[in-house]
Amino acid sequence: MKLTAQIKLLPSDEQAESLLRTLERANEACQYISDYAHESGEHSKYKLQDAVYHDVREQFDLGAQITVRALGKVADAYKTNPNTHNQFDIRGGFPYDSRILSFYTDRQEVSIWTLGGREKISYEVGENHRALLEQDKGEADLIYRNGMFFLLVSCQMPTANMSDEDVEAIDGYLGVDRGVNNIATTSDGDNWTSDQIDERRQWYQDRRDTLQSVGTRSAKRELQRLGGKQARFQRDTNHTISKRIVSKAKARNSAVVLEDLSGISERTTVRRQQRARHSNWSFYQLRQFIEYKALIAGIPVIKVDPAYTSQTCSNCGHCDSKNRNGSNFECQNCGHSVDADKNAARNIAARGAVNSPMVASEA
């Protein structure tokens, strides 16, 4: 499972100046390569390297590996937009790899290549991401935002099947139902509604509509800033929810059971007025957060088929589309009445108990 850890660099004034010059020079090189790629029609990384590698190193005074990363960044951009003359922000994010970036997690320090040579820079990291940095680390993007430097580090979390001993050690199964009206509901009744996210989403949407109608350069910058704030708010919300779920499962020695919602956006149709809300579903992100926190905590996560969990009575097993009426569930067979999402979560937990026990993983 690949996840991204964010760390905040704490450079001195001189180091910050060196990092910024490096970032700007590297992106200038990217633009030079992009101009050539657009004019020549050549987008392959290796052919671009044959054509402009030495020119880039000489003109921009870059090291060998930083030049290779610049070529890779441009080639990746043209894979996505082959018919566009791609433009690169002079202070846009830039990829680093292990040849030009080293981590010393024991003392929270990195050694990073700059135009002025290698710099050893301290960093700070939140609890959620510190454990990720102990895993195998891949490419990291150097980001400059609001006068601060960050590294977004790709980390590979290990996955493993549950052994027979793991199965025997489990004392229960905590089902989690994820949805639109409620972000998450557990089989024992905990619930996190989407009301606050909906309010924020609507505010951001109204603000975006206003700024897009203005269309000035400053309005476009504000649009970018708003997008980042909204994403951070939703990410923080999912971190809070996933931490609570995993902590509860850990305390009870229970497995966490989730529906396999792969492709839910493609399988679900919604009314036009609900599309913005539907597109704001964060099933995959919340699942990722639950999985990696559970993995660190030693708690198994089980995937189950989501079919009919919302229509099946968790009391008698009777399945009928009439059982559910909005947020209410009332069984047409036995009369069992309960919150609809809690009923679904109980069904999910029950399926986990009989499902082939395997830690969920997703590349």
Image (cartoon, rainbow, N blue to C red):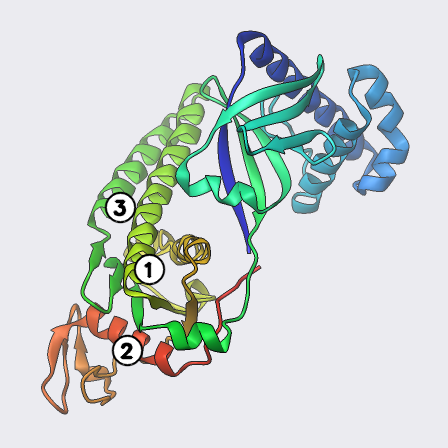
Residue furthest out toward the top = 14
Instruction: From the top left corner, tell me how far across and down residue 342 is, in percent.
Output: 20, 69
Identify which residue, 203 or 138, lies in the foreground: 138
Give left or right: position of 264 versus 80. Answer: left
Which label lies toward us, 2 or 3?
Answer: 2
Amino acid residing under circle 3:
Ile
- Distance from Cα at disc 2 to Cα at disc 1: 21 Å
- Quarter of the rendering occupied by the N terminus: bottom right
Tag on residue 88? none
Give left or right: position of 4 versus 300. Answer: right
Write down the residue under mark 3: 197
Residue at the (25%, 47%) spot, across then down: 198
- Distance from Cα at disc 2 to Cα at disc 3: 26 Å
Image position of 118 with respect to 296: above or below: above
- Distance from Cα at disc 3 to Cα at disc 1: 27 Å
Which label lies toward us, 2 or 1?
Answer: 1
Q: Is residue 358 in view from this perspective?
A: yes
Q: Is residue 307 in view from this perspective?
A: no
Instruction: From the top left corner, tell me how far across and down residue 175 is, in percent.
Output: 30, 69
Tag on residue 250? 1
Amino acid residing under circle 2:
Asn
The first of marks 2 and 1 along the sequence is 1
Image position of 211 with respect to 175: above or below: above
Write down the residue under mark 2: 347
Count neighbours of disc 2 (C-alpha within 10 A) and say few if under 14, some if 14 to 19, many if 20 or more.
many
Residue at the (70%, 46%) spot, across then down: 79
Which label lies toward us, 3 or 1?
Answer: 1
